Image: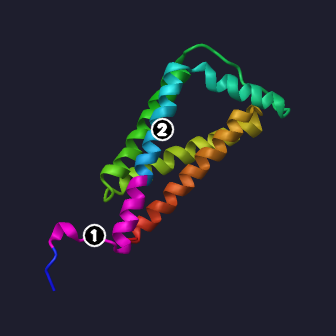
């Protein structure tokens, strides 16, 4: 029997697979958030126009399309923060604050979107954002709970 070097051994323990899954989720989320942030920055009217066309085709109200204003500045800033938090999940999986902050950001966005959809303006973009951010927040929360338990 020949001894194997440390570099030849692959850690296939459940803990290392879990950490790899957690890190990959953080990386994928950070890429998606960065792309969405760039869309908000470079083509701020396009997402609203797309959802307005879709909204009208299913019989829902459209959302006003306005020029670049404080909303867009805040939206790009928000996307930067959630991108950074997801990146921290990837780069520093032992850091337990990043997923907690990301969960709070996504669930707050989700709840506010549902409030706007049901109580203020029934535009499809609010409903879709409420569902998407709610699912992301719930998914990251599930990852956080599993991470906290030690995988």
Q: Where is the N terminus found, in terms of image quarters?
A: bottom left
- Give the mark nearer the N terminus: 1 vs 2: 1
Q: In the image, which disc is placed on residue 10?
A: 1
Q: Where is the C terminus found, in terms of image quarters?
A: bottom left
Q: Position of residue 57 (x, y in %)?
A: 83, 30
- Few, some or many residues within 10 Å of mark 1 (<14, 14–19, 20+): few
Q: For the point 67% across and 18% down, which residue is it? A: 65
Q: Position of residue 43 (x, y in %)?
A: 55, 20
Identify the secondary structure beneath mark 2: helix
Q: Quadrant of residue 115?
A: top right
> How far apart are labels 1 and 2 at the CA level?
31 Å
Q: Quadrant of residue 109?
A: top right
Q: For the point 61% across and 19% down, which residue is it? A: 45
Q: In the image, which disc is placed on residue 33?
A: 2
Q: Is 57 situated left or right of 149 in this image?
A: right
Q: For the point 52% across and 32% down, which residue is it? A: 36
The answer to whether 9 is drawn above or below residue 57 in the figure is below
Q: Which residues are magenta?
A: 5-24
């Amino acid at each position: 029997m020949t001894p194997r070097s440390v570099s030849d051994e692959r850690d296939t323990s459940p803990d290392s697979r879990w950490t790899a899954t957690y890190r990959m989720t953080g990386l994928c989320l950070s890429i998606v958030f960065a792309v969405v942030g760039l869309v908000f920055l470079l083509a701020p009217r396009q997402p609203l126009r797309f959802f307005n066309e879709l909204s009208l085709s299913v019989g829902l109200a459209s959302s006003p399309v306005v020029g670049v204003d404080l909303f867009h500045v805040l939206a790009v800033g928000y996307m930067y923060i959630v991108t950074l938090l997801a990146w921290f999940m990837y780069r520093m999986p032992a850091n337990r604050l990043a997923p907690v902050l990301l969960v709070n950001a996504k669930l707050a966005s989700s709840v506010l979107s549902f409030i706007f959809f049901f109580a203020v303006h029934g535009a499809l973009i609010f409903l879709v954002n409420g569902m998407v951010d709610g699912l992301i927040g719930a998914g990251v929360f599930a990852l956080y709970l599993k991470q906290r338990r030690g995988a």
